[in-house]
């Protein structure tokens, strides 16, 4: 996601315009595959299933975490007081949330001084629902430890949060790397990639699965899922699957199968971090031969995937949550 701050602001305006023009359509076009569970959220990117089985979604525009009942869709405020997304930006603010046992941690990005903000990029712990506690200043770490190639945003663009072995993994889609953050706030680099734009993550034991968008233009061959072993000395990447553009998340379902989320087709040569074309997103199954199978298509700007049992929950950039039941059955009855 290399670009100047001027381009960041310009592409943000374009992205917001695209999102506003998009007409949500997954269940309208695929009414038997899913239903709208919640809408009207403000500034959504990530999400997670909490220890109580509810879906927790950051609303970056409001600086809040919203709890959504996965049965009824009832939405309530779980936490507030987080740094808000900067006005005019389609990225930044509270990007993702994760739980370590019963404690919630929130990833915040693009709110620091180097992009015109006044807050701190990093991980916040929810000790008090209205007064989050800063645990790790990832922006400062990123500025002090830049990657070995030219960048435009010194503080980086942190995308996703994943609990692992007493700490949290963080992807940075601008600095193209994964960081490990201990619960005490110590930060270190785990792996450095080329220009692959890592996004969502999943883990199985010591193996970390990474979704990759790839550089602009978002070509199908650059949309990938890769993996690496967290404890291997070399941490060599391994190709898991490829073939669809803009892979933004990866997650295991109840059957142990791996699923991925494509935000959709590239609208052309756009600025990095611009979204895919509206109504072109897909829920994918990862196959053992390195290919993907499309289970649900015509998703509108999906950004995050989570599972409760065999039910998938898809968060979109336009503030919606979609519920897709019986995902394993879709393997045999493509929607």
Image: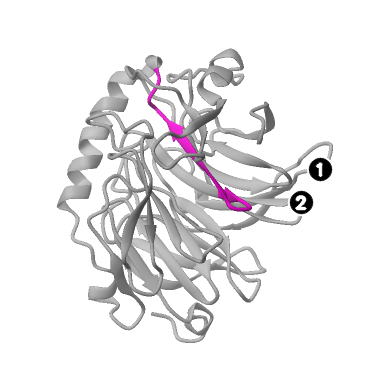
The residue carrying pointer 2 sits among few (fewer than 14), some (14 to 19) or many (20 or more) residues within 10 Å by Cα, namely few
Q: Position of residue 103 (x, y in %)?
A: 57, 47
Spot the residue most to the left: 21
Residue 241 is drawn in which quadrant? bottom right
Its colouring scheme is: one colour
**Residue 91 on image: x %, y %:** 34, 36
Q: Mark 2 — residue?
A: 206
Cβ–Cβ under 8 Å for marks 1 and 2:
yes
Residue 231: mark: 1
Q: Is residue 211 visible?
A: no
- Mark 2 falls on what kind of element? loop
Which quarter of the rendering shows the C terminus? Answer: bottom left
Report x, y in % for residue 270.
Answer: 30, 37
Q: Is residue 113 left or right of residue 17?
A: right
Is 329 within the magenta?
A: no
Counting every numbered tag in the picture gives: 2
Residue 100 highlighted magenta (yes or no): yes
Q: Is 24 or 293 nearer to us in this picture?
A: 24
Q: Which residues are magenta?
A: 99-112
Q: Earlier in the sequence, mark 1 or mark 2?
A: 2
Instruction: Name the residue rendered at 40%, 15% in the picture.
Output: 114
């Amino acid at each position: 996601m290399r670009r100047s701050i001027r381009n960041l602001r310009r592409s943000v305006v374009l992205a917001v315009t695209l999102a506003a023009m998009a007409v949500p359509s997954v269940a309208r076009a695929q009414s038997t595959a899913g239903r709208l569970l919640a809408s009207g959220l403000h500034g959504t990117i990530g999400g997670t299933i909490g220890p109580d089985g509810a879906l927790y979604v950051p609303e970056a525009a409001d600086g809040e975490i919203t709890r959504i009942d996965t049965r009824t869709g009832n939405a309530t405020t779980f936490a507030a007081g987080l740094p808000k997304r900067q006005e005019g930006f389609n990225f930044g603010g509270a990007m993702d949330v994760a739980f370590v046992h019963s404690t919630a941690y929130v990833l915040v990005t693009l709110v620091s001084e180097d992009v015109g903000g006044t807050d701190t990029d990093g991980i916040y712990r929810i000790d008090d629902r209205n007064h989050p506690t800063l645990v790790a200043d990832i922006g400062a770490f990123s500025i002090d430890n830049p990657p070995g190639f030219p960048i435009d945003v010194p503080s980086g663009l942190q995308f996703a949060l994943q609990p692992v072995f007493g700490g949290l993994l963080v992807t940075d889609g601008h600095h193209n790397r994964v960081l490990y953050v201990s619960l005490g706030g110590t930060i270190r680099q785990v792996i450095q990639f080329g220009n692959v734009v890592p996004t969502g993550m999943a883990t199985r034991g010591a193996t970390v699965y990474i979704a990759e968008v790839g550089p602009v233009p978002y070509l199908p061959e650059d949309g990938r899922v890769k993996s690496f072993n967290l404890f291997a000395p070399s941490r060599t990447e391994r190709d898991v699957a490829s073939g669809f553009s803009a892979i933004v998340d990866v997650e295991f379902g109840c059957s142990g199968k791996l699923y991925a989320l494509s935000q959709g087709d590239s609208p052309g040569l756009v600025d990095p971090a611009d979204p895919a074309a509206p109504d072109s997103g897909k829920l994918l199954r990862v196959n053992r031969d390195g290919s993907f199978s499309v289970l649900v298509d015509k998703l509108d700007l999906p950004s995050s995937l989570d599972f409760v049992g065999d039910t998938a929950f898809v968060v979109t950039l336009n503030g919606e949550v979609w519920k897709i039941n019986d995902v394993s059955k879709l393997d045999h009855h493509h929607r």
